[in-house]
Amino acid sequence: MKPQHQTLFLAVALALSPVAIAGGAIQATDLDTIVVTATRTAIKAEDSNVPVQVIDRAVIERSQAASLVDLLRGRAGINLANQGGPGKLTSMFLRGTESDHVLVLVDGVRIGSATAGMVMFQDLPLEQIERIEIVRGPRSSLYGSEAIGGVIQIFTRRAGDGEGLRSNFSLGVGSNALRQASAGIGGGGERGWFQAQGAWQRTDGIDSCRGTAAGWGAGCYADEPDRDGYRNASVSLRGGGKLGETVELEGHAMVADAFNEYDGTVFGGNEADNRQQVFGGRLGWRPREGADVNVRIGRADDKAESHFFDHATGTRSFASTIDTRRDTASAQGDFAVGGTQLLSAGIDWMRDRVTGSTDFTVDRRDNTGVFLAYQGGFGAHSLEASLRHDDNEQFGGHSTGSLGYGLKFGDGFRFTASAGTGFKVPTFNDLYYPGGWGNPDLEPEESRTLNLGIAQYGDGWNWSFNAFQTDVDELIGYDAGFALVNVDEARIRGAELTGFFSLAGWDLNAELSHIDPRNRSAGPNLDNWLPRRSRNTARVDVDRAFGAFRAGVSAFGSGERFDDAANSVRLPGYGTLDLRVEYAINADWTLQARVSNVFDREYETIAWYNQPGREYGLTLRYSPAN
């Protein structure tokens, strides 16, 4: 058996073993883990009627992941497609939906490109992240557009509980001339807290594309067999305080500047300067026990400027620039009724604006959404419902709803059922791209999802199984004349099995996903797989502490996928194995070492685009225990 086949077999076998099935989300050692993204209010993760997962700072550091993309690889319901290694464009397909069908928030602020409709996951620095909440399934009835496949919320670093100052520091090196560093300081007292964090990363990268300028369909249409480097410098600030006994104020900011080299042409460039900016503030007021009012404002910028560097002459010429800005504001009130029921009502406002070297007929639009939500507990039963109406100045109103039910019964079991609708507004590229490529008459894409789940929670272990079906209508695609129209349909069926088990120092986490993403559009692609989604993925993480040492292994397996809608370009499945070890020098200092892709597996998640082979890394971390 080949090494890569051994890895895939190991991932699947461990995920299906009785031990692996006894678990849930990767960090789920604490049944009182709190999530806020699933309902826009704080609830226990185990009480959510929709599938949720939380990845906290301890898990991030223990995983030794080099990027956010590496950390999310293989998580339940997630498929990633990457254009050639670190820093390169990465698309996420959550539960088989499109890459622009996932809503991403940073500290409560909606981010993403209003033109391309995607989030630059590769440019969000992992060292700036404290916690990630992943909600699988539609949440448009709470958040509006984009939340068809689910919602991912990223929380930046913040000071821990307690008085006084706390600092952190890390320094790392690795293969392909990887260099990275981060440092932060924060503190708090009875009336307020703050956190400041900086991070820097640079790598020479790999040759991102094996394509050629000769022939049609040859990848990046360029002959540039060189290393494509990447660097990222970022800073984040968070702080908050109490203004009297009933009012609190919080603010946050994150700026990440990235430089990316890629294989390209004089038309699209081969270098890009990217900037991700997120600013926000929250004012909270508790007029009485059981009543909370929160007002938020935010701004997110997605900026990209492309250039072409001619290696023969050493000159750099301008190719294009695009800047999308998203301003948001919201007000939400949560009111407890009878101690076991909660009513929430809110209003969201958003404005998208586009500037750059491409002239759009319309370069801004506003959207206002109002929602009403209910959560109730009745002994072993729980119920939630939400309704929302969005009014967009480009195409009018759209209403969505969701309903969820949960039942607890003997031996820690819990059954859940949920149904919800979702929608996605067309992007500025879809609607207004010059040259006749846009269609201003497009309508929003719409979805319907049903999810059934069963879970069991025990002392030091839990597991969950969810099965779902999503139907998407009015998908935007090309007609016979290559014009954008709402003609496509899709049906996605799937199941997810997650597990956690902790015993005698061993921690085992398993995540198994199966999707059947089918094109249901009339025409030659009817019943084909949707492109760039693997039907089967598995991830298993095993960690063990031995005194001052801790060792771990991560096995990841992915089945085959197709790179095109016609299913004529097949990408084979693959498996990788990562090893890691760390040594606690003392209570504050830790030395970590890792080997990724141990068997040096060659594979692609997008045709023609290479992925890193075997890589090594070494990191020194300082994080005070108290």
Image (cartoon, rainbow, N blue to C red):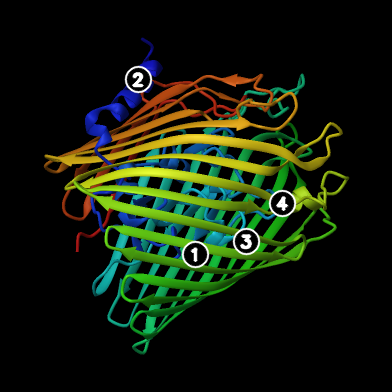
Q: Quadrant of the N terminus?
A: top left
Residue occupied by mark 1: 108
> What whole-number distance in Å separates the C-alpha atoms at marks 4 and 3?
19 Å
Q: Nearer the viewer, mark 4 or mark 1?
A: 4
Q: Amino acid at mark 3?
A: Asp
Percent x, y of residue 126: 43, 50
How crowded pointer 4 is (Cα within 10 Å; few <14, some 14-19, many 20+) is rated as: many
The residue type indicated by label 4 comes to Pro
The residue shown at (42%, 47%) is: 180
**Separation of disc 2 and disc 3 at Cα?**
43 Å
- Alpha carbon distance from label 3 to label 1: 15 Å
Q: Which mark sits nearer the N-terminus, 4 or 1?
A: 1
* Mark number, residue 426: 4
> On the image, numbered disc 3 is attached to which residue?
301
In the rendered structure, which amino acid carries the disc numbered 2? Phe
230 or 536, nearer to the observer? 536
Verify CB contact (< 8 Å) between mark 1 and mark 2.
no
Which quarter of the figure has residue 609?
top right
